[in-house]
Amino acid sequence: MRMRGLLALLTIIILLAAFASVYAQLSETEAEQKFNQYGCTNCHTEGGAADPWDEVLDEIRAWATEYGSLDEGARHVVYFGQSGKFNSFDELISQMASNVGKSPSDISDLVQFLKNEFNEAKGTAGGSPSPSPTTGGGGGGLPTELLYAIIIFIIIIVIIVAYVMRRR
């Protein structure tokens, strides 16, 4: 019986961790830090070859009112004077990742943030899209640090409960 209880607790911990990792989302501040960390600012700077972070974010949000999808928005991106170079958002991201020596999977957290920003703005596309709060991210997720603190707290509580139950 004790083994079943322990197995059930372990299953709950694993499910909570899986749920939390899916729900975790970068905040706008964290996304900007990733943008800088990944080397995107090599080109994306004020007066540089490409728009800086704030303008990239504004553009993604504006696409929600101008275009039906991220793919359609990507087709209108001007890349070194050439419009229509990208057939999809994934192609655009692949090129941007390549520019900084990364693969799209290396920057997937930042890409997911941008997709969430587009989708959130799409939900408010009747008016002008409102920017996301700095803490809380683009799609209503919890800030990553808070989410991890909650997970650790839950795991500690489960361990304490398991210990007390075992002592009985």
Image (spheres, grey):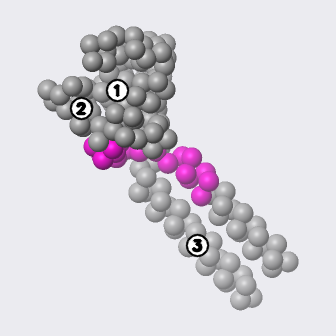
- State the residue in front, 164 or 105: 105
Check residue 157 in the rendering and tell me which mark sits there, or answer none.
3
Disc 2 crowd rating (10 Å Cα; few below 14, some 14-19, many 20+) is some
Q: Earlier in the sequence, mark 3 or mark 2?
A: 2
- Where is residue 6, by image quadrant? bottom right
Q: Earlier in the sequence, mark 1 or mark 3?
A: 1
Residue occupied by mark 2: 43
Q: Secondary structure of the magenta portion, mostly? A: helix
Q: Earlier in the sequence, mark 1 or mark 2?
A: 2
- State the residue in front, 40 or 70: 40
Q: Residue furthest left?
A: 47
What amino acid is labelled 3 in the image?
Ile
What amino acid is labelled 1 in the image?
Ser
Viewer can see residue 80: yes
Q: Residue furthest right?
A: 1
Residue 29 x/y as whole percent:
31, 44
Residue occupied by mark 1: 130
Residue 68 x/y as whole percent:
49, 13
Viewer can see residue 138: no
In magenta stretch: residue 20? yes
- Vertical arrangement, residue 87 with respect to residue 37, above or below: above
Q: Which residues are magenta?
A: 17-38
Of circles 3 and 2, which is in front?
2
Instruction: Give how far apart the Cα atoms at labels 1 and 2 are.
Output: 26 Å
